[in-house]
Image (cartoon, grey):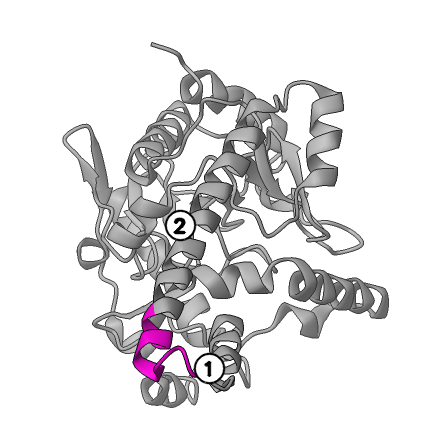
Amino acid sequence: MIFLKETDKLLAKPLTKMFTFKKYLYIFIILTVLASFALFFSSLKSNDAISRLSPKNPSSSDKLNQQLSSSQIPLHINLADFYQTYGQKLLGNDDLKIISRDEWGADNNFANPDYINNLCQKITCSLDEYDPENTFSEEEYLKARGLLINYQNNFQNYNNLFLQTQQKENGIDYEYLPVEEIIIHHTAGKFTLDLDESIKEIQRIYLLHAIQRRWRDIGYHFLIDGKGRIFEGNLGGKYSVGAHTYYHNEGSIGIALMGDFRKGHNVLTKEMKDSLIKLILYLKKEYKWDFSNKEFYLKKKDLSGREWSDKFIKGHKELDIHLIPTACPGIEPQKLREMIYPYLFVTL
């Protein structure tokens, strides 16, 4: 919009006797194209300079955090892949099976507002779309307002720049943004080993999210049961914005471990660990993330900007704003990183 306004100003200036309007317009177009090329190559140089600053060096990290604005693109994401593939289904490959929504019985009627309203006359539902702010204390609400202000100041323009939408067969217009991190959850529900029981549990979560909370779909992108089976989550597909972490849904993938993994409850099985690692390696390949560095220029928890961090994989609890944070995903996030990173950063 700024460019168009500046263009209007230029075109509104009176023409001199030496130039006809047509010639003036041609010159203006040529100058605009040249200026665009100059800006493009300037940005490339800027990115090269950024990449030369090693985030492993604390002093370099501090300088980089001071020099860069939070609107700049993290170096590990692949924008070309984003624009070419957003909305595509991710159902695995020869080495990784992902059980599709059709296979676990997702009902696209759950996205229909009339269907939701009719069903909610028979079961308990939120009066309106579920909003976690309705459960906040006064202090938590004030923290949430600060989060909103930081988002508006630091990331809203960034998201608006890249935001894409695509309507799927359930009638929902899904939103899409470049993905820069993975957030691990647990469902805090039933731990299942049997396939039929796992499907029933996913359908319960689907009902809770889509109907009772009126989100119209399941909030997670993927779910993993006790036997290590991986299930497709929301219908949006690759790069879709889910509903799993307050103010951190944009630019993230939500993976849910089925069960309650707090101490004294369920224990993460070897099959779950193996599948979680395989799924993340599969996503690394599909999203074409650049892991040449072990630190990433990520959003801060409070959205006050970006910082260099090794927490490409986070636990939900690390982003929760409640005064008493959620225990999700039950397992300590650092233990998850220690389990996954040796495979993620392997050098050939």
Q: In the current view of this chain or complex, which residue is farthest to the front?
A: 18
Residue at 56% over, 47% down: 72
Q: Of 303 and 10, which appears nearest the observer?
A: 10
Report whether 224 appears left or right of 69: left
Is residue 23 a member of the stretch shown in magenta? yes
Residue at 44% over, 19% down: 345
The residue to which callout 2 is attached is 37
Occupied quadrant, residue 272: top left
Report whether 311 appears left or right of 301: left
Nearer the observer: mark 1 or 2; the answer is 1
| Majority secondary structure of magenta residues | helix
- Where does the magenta region start and end? 17-26
Question: Which is nearer the N-term, disc 1 or disc 2?
Answer: 1
* Image quarter hosting the C terminus: top left
* Kind of residue indicated by mark 1: Thr
* Kind of residue indicated by mark 2: Phe
The residue to which callout 1 is attached is 16
On the image, the x and y values in percent for residue 226 come to: 38, 36
On the image, the x and y values in percent for residue 4 come to: 47, 76
Q: Of 106 and 316, which appears nearest the observer?
A: 316
**Which mark, residue 218?**
none
Report whether 17 appears left or right of 336: left
On the image, the x and y values in percent for residue 237 come to: 29, 55
Please rate how many residues cluster around mark 2, counting C-alpha atoms within 10 Å: few if below 14, some from 14 to 19, many from 20: few
